[in-house]
Amino acid sequence: MTIKKMVIDEIISRMEKYPSYNLVIMGHSFGAAIAAIMASNIAVGSLGPKFSPSKIELVTFGSSRVGNKYFAESIDGAGFADVARIVHSTDILPHIAPMRLGYQHYKGEVWLSSVSKKWVTCDDRDPKNPGEALNCANSIGTFHVSRITHSNYWSRTRDNLCMIHMSSKPMEVIFLPKFGLIKY
């Protein structure tokens, strides 16, 4: 059995067991890209049964730009219960996959400013790229980014983590580390 099949089977099982709960899909780094793609695929039913996007929450940490304008628009318009694309200060990864090659972030950026040390909900949108907020991570420019801040969110080091859980049952978690599947 593949990891993909195990994860999809587990999601189906949990959604049937807890139909009133939201499915929360989270990821850091490469896991953030996987989380965004997975949320999109689950919402349209391409991985199995279709689940209502209003029952899906997407939370990413230190995500690169995952796709082009159309992918970003599909996330923005999916009708997810919540989308939060969290960026820590000068994290380098949100600047990877450059806009000049057609990559674009989806909306929902929440940024920890390195100057004020406060969380900023980013709403000053670039008219050409709505997923890019002018007052947040893009305001620091690409010459002031750091690999160190990418590995440290809330004083916890993460590496390519993707995590799925039912929001009302935080102990029921499926972790997808780089190699393998761990079910709690």
Image: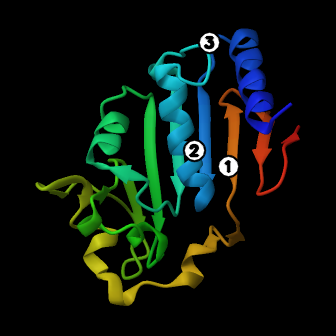
Label 2 neighbourhood size at 10 Å, few (<14), some (14-19), many (20+)? many
How far apart are labels 1 and 3 at the CA level?
Answer: 23 Å
* Three-letter code for the amino acid on which mark 3 is drawn: Ser
Residue where numbered disc 3 is placed: 20
Residue at numbered disc 2: 35
Drawn side of residue 65 relative to residue 34, left or right: left
Q: Position of residue 62 (x, y in %)?
A: 52, 64
- Badge 3 marks a residue whose secondary structure is loop
Q: Residue at x 79, y 38 (%)?
A: 3
The residue that appears at 63% across and 19% down in the rendered structure is: 21
Please report the residue visible at 54 percent of the width from the left and 15 percent of the height from the top: 50
Q: Is residue 89 left or right of residue 26?
A: left
Q: Residues within 10 Å of mark 1 (few under 14, many from 20)?
A: many
Quadrant in which the N terminus appears = top right
Marks 1 & 2, CB-CB < 8 Å contact: yes
Tally the numbered discs: 3
Q: Amino acid at mark 1?
A: Cys
Residue 73, position as x, y percentages in the image: 28, 39
Q: For mark 1, what is the residue?
A: 162
Q: Picture quarter containing residue 11?
A: top right
